[in-house]
Image: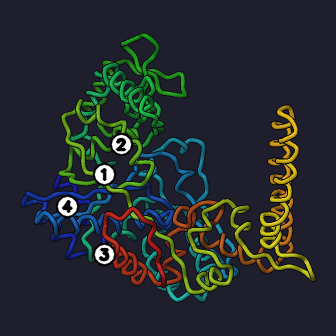
């Protein structure tokens, strides 16, 4: 495995720290702090960059506490074939409006091919030119574009371009990379694949039992258990389309390629695995098992979804005799620049407020009142001080005249209070909606902090943040915040450039 790591790092930008980490791995007694992500365009969503930084910070923290050398490692999820999920990158243009950069979808024949075998076409130059125009005038634009142009070139694999950028950014931190679409990695993983095929029924029962236990405890499962082998098969060749292996009915001598009518005899499948293991790759549930079987993984830094599906993996770790790692949630960040902070102050909001539903945000604002329109809060105070006590007096007097009037009186009390609150609330919302300045400011805040209704780090790509700050400054700011807050924090950390 060490030979694989050495060779794969040799193709990356030179790094003294990375070479030192490889030397430490060769000496033994070293722990790996792993993370990983799909190889998205221009590094994909911002949380990919944050994941890498989190792995570096966790490695430093565990090494400092334990005295054991810890090497941060990024597992490149190149086996996956979901190209649609990685072919875009969003930034904001000079007008602040989000803009999406996209690679062409490619042919139908490529739809199920692992992204490891996807190469950049001539369109990448036009995308870089457009990115340059979108980032024009930003302090870090030139630095960002220089780095991206050096790696994202026509004819180069998407995985190599992604790795080259991330390796350059974290060269001084010694981040090591592993691409599993390597015949040597597949050969090492082959015994696990074989067990998945031969013990599929047993593994399925174990996973179903775990899912039932989670459901009984009130937890939803992240990955559904199917009648399959947890292994994908690449039809025709190593670069062929990728299909999940599933049982062909009750016939134990054949396997079906999910979504097709094709089948592969059991004996032929095992023969192919022995001769050409790169024709096989992992599912979401199996990938962590292979990772931790091949590496001395002490901790895994993952996102919320990954952390959730680890709850299902206990039976798999037991089946393969692999020790599960410590799970560390990746740190979440929110960049709040000076202009955004000013808008927030003018609106009387905090950055975290933008994660609330839009109607709740507007309900909190002090509306601008045209002319002599009353203040909604003063109307509420008047209802509480004068109207509701008067209603209560009437209700009590009526209730006292007979038991049969008690329940209608109680309903009337609730109806009056509810109707007045609904009316005042609608009036307050109407005032806010008439305030164009407030509406524009909220829209601007949403574009920066909660674009498209999702967290900033899930929408914008790395060039958006690095363009504002510069790639080096961006990394140092993130690592400094991690050092201040602690590598294991579960709070959303604000970047305040």
Q: Nearer the viewer, residue 130 or 393?
A: 393
**Alpha-carbon neighbours of circle 1 within 10 Å: few (<14), some, or many (≥20)?**
some
**Alpha-carbon neighbours of circle 3 within 10 Å: few (<14), some, or many (≥20)?**
some
Q: Which residue is drawn at 51% across and 75% down?
A: 335
Task: Say how the picture is coloured.
Answer: rainbow
Q: Residue 28 location in percent, x, y?
A: 8, 57
Q: How far apart are marks 1 and 3 (CA)?
A: 19 Å
Q: Residue 248 location in percent, x, y?
A: 45, 17
N-terminal of the two: label 2 or label 3?
2
Q: Nearer the viewer, residue 354 or 326?
A: 354
Query: Quick check: marks 4 and 2 in contact, CB under 8 Å?
Result: no
- What residue is shown with label 3? 483
- What residue is shown with label 1? 327
Q: Residue 419 location in percent, x, y?
A: 85, 53
Res. 8 image quadrant: bottom left
N-terminal of the two: label 2 or label 1?
2
Residue 310's disc is 2
Q: Which of 324 and 32 is in front in this view?
A: 324
Asked if residue 178 can be seen in this view, the reply is yes
């Amino acid at each position: 495995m060490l030979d694989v790591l050495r060779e794969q790092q040799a193709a990356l930008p030179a790094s003294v720290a990375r070479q030192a980490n490889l030397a430490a791995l060769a000496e033994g007694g070293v722990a790996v702090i792993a993370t990983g992500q799909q190889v998205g365009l221009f590094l994909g969503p911002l949380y990919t960059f944050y994941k890498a930084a989190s792995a570096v910070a966790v490695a430093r923290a565990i090494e400092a506490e334990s005295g054991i050398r810890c090497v941060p490692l990024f597992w490149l999820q190149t086996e996956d074939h979901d190209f649609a999920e990685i072919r875009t990158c969003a930034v904001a243009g000079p007008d602040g409006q989000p803009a999406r950069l996209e690679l062409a979808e490619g042919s139908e024949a490529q739809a199920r091919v692992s992204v490891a075998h996807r190469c950049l076409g001539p369109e990448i130059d036009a995308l870089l030119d457009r990115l340059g125009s979108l980032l024009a005038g930003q302090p870090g634009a030139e630095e960002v574009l220089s780095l991206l142009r050096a790696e994202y070139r026509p004819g180069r694999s998407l995985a190599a371009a992604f790795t080259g950028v991330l390796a350059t950014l974290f060269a001084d931190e010694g981040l090591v990379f592993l691409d599993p679409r390597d015949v040597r990695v597949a050969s090492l993983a082959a015994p696990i694949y074989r067990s998945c095929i031969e013990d599929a029924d047993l593994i399925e029962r174990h996973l179903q039992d775990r899912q039932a236990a989670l459901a009984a405890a009130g937890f939803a499962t992240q990955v559904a258990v199917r009648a399959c082998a947890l292994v994908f098969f690449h039809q025709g060749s190593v670069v062929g389309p990728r299909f999940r292996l599933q049982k062909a009915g009750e016939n134990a001598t054949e396997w079906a390629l999910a979504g097709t009518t094709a089948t592969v005899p059991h004996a032929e499948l095992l023969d192919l695995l022995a001769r050409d293991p790169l024709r096989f790759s992992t599912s979401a549930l199996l990938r962590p098992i292979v990772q931790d079987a091949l590496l001395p993984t002490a901790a895994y830094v993952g996102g919320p979804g990954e952390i959730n599906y680890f709850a299902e993996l206990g039976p798999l770790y037991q089946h393969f005799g692999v020790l599960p790692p410590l799970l560390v949630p990746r740190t979440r960040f929110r960049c709040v620049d000076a202009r955004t902070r000013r808008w927030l102050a003018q609106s009387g909001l905090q950055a975290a407020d933008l994660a609330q539903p839009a109607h709740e945000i507007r309900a909190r604002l002090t509306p601008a009142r045209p002319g002599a329109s009353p203040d909604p809060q003063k109307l509420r105070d008047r209802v509480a001080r004068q109207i509701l006590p008067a209603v209560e007096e009437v209700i009590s007097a009526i209730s006292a005249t007979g038991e049969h009037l008690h329940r209608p009186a109680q309903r009337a009390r609730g109806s009056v209070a509810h109707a007045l609150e609904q009316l005042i609330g609608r009036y307050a919302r109407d005032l806010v909606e008439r305030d164009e300045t407030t509406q524009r400011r909220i829209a601007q805040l949403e574009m920066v902090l909660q674009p498209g209704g999702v967290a900033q780090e899930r929408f914008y790509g790395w060039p958006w943040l690095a363009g504002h700050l510069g790639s080096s400054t961006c990394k140092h700011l993130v690592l400094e915040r991690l050092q201040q807050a602690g590598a294991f924090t579960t709070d959303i950390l604000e970047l305040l450039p």
